[in-house]
Amino acid sequence: MKIRKYTEMDSMANNVSGGAVLVVTGPDLYQSGRLQSTVVKRFREALDYEILRFEADKLGEGDLKRHLLENSLFSSGKLIVISNTNRLGKAAVSELLDAIKEGLSDSAIFLSSSKVPRESAILRKLEKAVPVYTCYEPFDRDMPGWAKKLASEENIRLTRDTIQLLTEYSGRSLRRLSDAVIKLALYHGHGAEIDRGGMIEVISGKGGADIFHLGDMIFCNRRGEAVDAAWSLLQYGEEPLGMIAYLFSLWQKVIGAMEIVEAGGGNQEVSAATGAKYPLLDKLMKFTRTACKVDTAVAAEAFAEADHGVKTGVDHLVLFSRLIFTLTSGHL
C-alpha cells in the first residue's frame, strides 16, 4: 500500500501496534530517521517491546523466521528493525513475505531502505502488501510547514520573516532546517519568539558573517564582495557543505525565476514555481535583472566540483573563489 503523505505515515508510526509491518524508503534520510525513531519510541515506551536491529544482508536463511518465532523473555513482544531492505537475500525475502502473509502475533517489523520501489523487486512486492512511504526531499512550498512543525516541537515561536529566512537558509534540506531550529531553541530558550535578527544572530554569530549576504553578492554579480563574504563565513566557522547547499538551492530558484521572466511571467508565476514569498520573492525578481547569465551545465558542474573539493580536502577559500568566479562576471 503506497502512502503518499508524510503526515499519514507519521500518524501510523505514532499509533502502530503489534502485528504491524511498516516500510520507509527513499533518499531523504531525515524523514526516514524521524519515522524510525517514532516507531521505536512507540514500541519501547508505550508497548514495552524489545527492539532488535539488523542489516538486511546479515540475515541468513532461517534468521528472520527464528527471531519471529522466539518469545521475548522480558518484554511483551519484539520490534524487528531492518535497514537496507533492498539487500535482503532470497531466503530472508521468502521468510519475510511468508510472515506478512501469515500475520504476526507478538512481533512487529519496521523496514527501511535508501532505494525506492522502482529500484528494488522486494520493495515493489512490499508496496503491494504493507504500508510503504517513500521519502523524497520536500517541495519548496512544504518547507514553511516543516519549519513551523519543528519549531513547535522545540517549543519556540518563529515570526513570518524568520520562517522565510530559515527556509531560504535550509534550501530543501530538512536536516539543515532541523539543526538550525535546534540551535535557535538552545540559544533563545523554550517559549521564546524569534524574529529575523534573533535568527541571524544565531546562524551568523554576533557581528559575524551572514550567509544571506553571500548569496546576495553572488546574484547581484558583485564578485569581490562575494569572495570577502565567503572568506568571512569560513573564518566564523560556517560549514562549507552547508554554504554550498544554500547557494545551490538559491541558484536553482534564480535560474527558475529568470526562465519565467524571460518567458513573460511575473511575480505570481515565479512565486508559484519557486514557493518564494515576500521578501525572498522580491529578492528573486531583483536577481533576474542582476545575476550573471551562466550556462546551466557550466554552473551545475561548478557546484559539483565545489562539493567534491570540500570532501577531498581542497582549500575552502580556493574552491569558493572558483565557484564565485563561475557564477559572476564582475571584477575584484
Image (tube, helix red, strand yellow):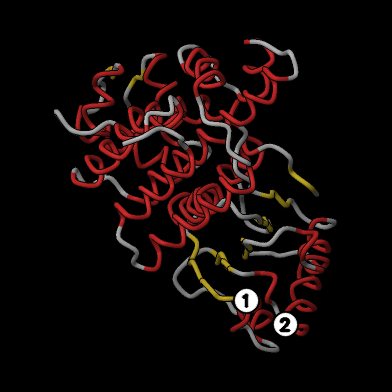
Q: Residue at x 70, y 21 (%)?
A: 260
Q: Position of residue 131 (x, y in %)?
A: 74, 51
Question: Where does residue 168 sit, x and y in percent of width and height?
Answer: 45, 29
Q: Which residue is mark 2?
A: 89
Name the residue type under label 1.
Ala
Could you tell whether 186 is left or right of 41 in the image?
A: left
Q: What percent of the width, then of the height, locates residue 306?
A: 44, 55
Q: Give above or below for 296 relative to 44.
A: above
Residue visible at 61% across and 69% down in the picture? 84
Q: Secondary structure at mark 1?
A: helix
322 displayed left or right of 300: left
Q: Is residue 149 above or below residue 60?
A: above
Q: Viewed as shown, does residue 196 lie left or right of 263?
A: left
Q: Label 2: few (<14), some or many (≥20) within 10 Å?
A: some
Q: Is residue 54 above or below residue 207?
A: below
Q: Which residue is mark 1?
A: 56
Task: Please say if the residues under marks 1 and 2 sit with CB atoms less than 8 Å apart.
Answer: yes
Marks 1/2: CA–CA distance:
8 Å
Task: Residue 114 in the image: state x and y as whole percent.
Answer: 62, 61
Q: Residues within 10 Å of mark 1 (few under 14, many from 20)?
A: many
Say which of 189 and 236 sits in front. Answer: 236
Which of the two discs, 1 and 2, labels the residue nearer the N terminus? 1
- Residue 147 in sight: yes
Q: Amino acid at mark 2?
A: Gly
Residue drawn at the location 46% of the way across and 35% of the way down: 329
The answer to whether residue 153 is seen in the rendering is: no
Q: Nearer the viewer, residue 319 or 330?
A: 330
